[in-house]
């Protein structure tokens, strides 16, 4: 608690589930409410997203059809794990492009 008071820490051996940095989301939500505005797309980054040098992680509002994350989720390369079992995961992935056909 002394070093990171914003995040609860389980005891050793207990796995933490990703909260998408809920403490950051709360801080931005409070700031936006104080300023009477919506949280802008890409204004809020998770810690993993912020520290990824390749920009491989995108986080945003999937209810906003114009957000970057929604546009990426609309691509036909987008897939989630076990979607055929109707798991409807929030985290999805973009399939790798291998040997694309040449432009005709
Ligand atoms: S986005 Fe990364 S740092 Fe944030 S809660 Fe999830 S795993 Fe942890």
Image: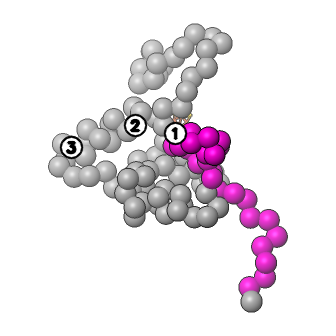
Mark number, residue 24: 2
Separation (CA) of disc 1 from disc 2: 9 Å
| Rendering coords of residue 80 (x, y %) | 61, 47
Residue at the disc numbered 3: 33
Q: Is residue 18 left or right of residue 34?
A: right
Tell which circle, 3 or 2, labels the residue nearer the N-terminal end.
2
Q: Give the distance between the C-alpha atoms of the residues marked 3 and 2, in whole angstroms.
A: 14 Å
Q: Given contact means CB atoms under 8 Å apart, are the residues at marks 1 and 3 in contact?
A: no
Q: Residue at x 53, y 58 (%)?
A: 73
Q: Are marks 3 and 2 in contact (CB under 8 Å)?
A: no
Q: Nearer the viewer, residue 81 or 61?
A: 81
Residue 56 % position (x, y):
62, 52
* Quadrant housing residue 101: bottom right
* Residue 18 shows in this picture: yes
Task: Determine whether label 1 and label 2 are within 8 Å by CB.
Answer: yes
What span is colored magenta in the figure? 79-103
Q: Earlier in the sequence, mark 1 or mark 3?
A: 3
Q: Secondary structure at mark 2?
A: helix
Residue at 48% across, 37% down:
20
Work out how far the residue at label 1 is from the one at label 3, CA to CA, in angstroms: 22 Å
Q: Dot 3 surroundings within 10 Å: few (below 14), some, or many (20 or more)? A: few
Residue for badge 1: 47
């Amino acid at each position: 608690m002394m070093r990171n008071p914003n995040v609860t820490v389980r005891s050793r051996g207990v796995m933490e589930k990703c909260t998408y940095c809920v403490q950051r989301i709360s801080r931005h939500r409070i700031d936006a409410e104080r300023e009477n505005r919506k949280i802008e797309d890409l204004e809020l980054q998770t810690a993993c997203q912020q520290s990824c040098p390749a920009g491989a992680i995108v986080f945003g509002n999937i209810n906003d059809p114009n957000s970057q994350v929604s546009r990426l989720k609309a691509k036909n390369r987008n897939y989630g794990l076990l979607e055929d079992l109707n798991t409807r995961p929030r985290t999805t992935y973009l399939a790798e492009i291998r040997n694309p056909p040449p432009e005709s």
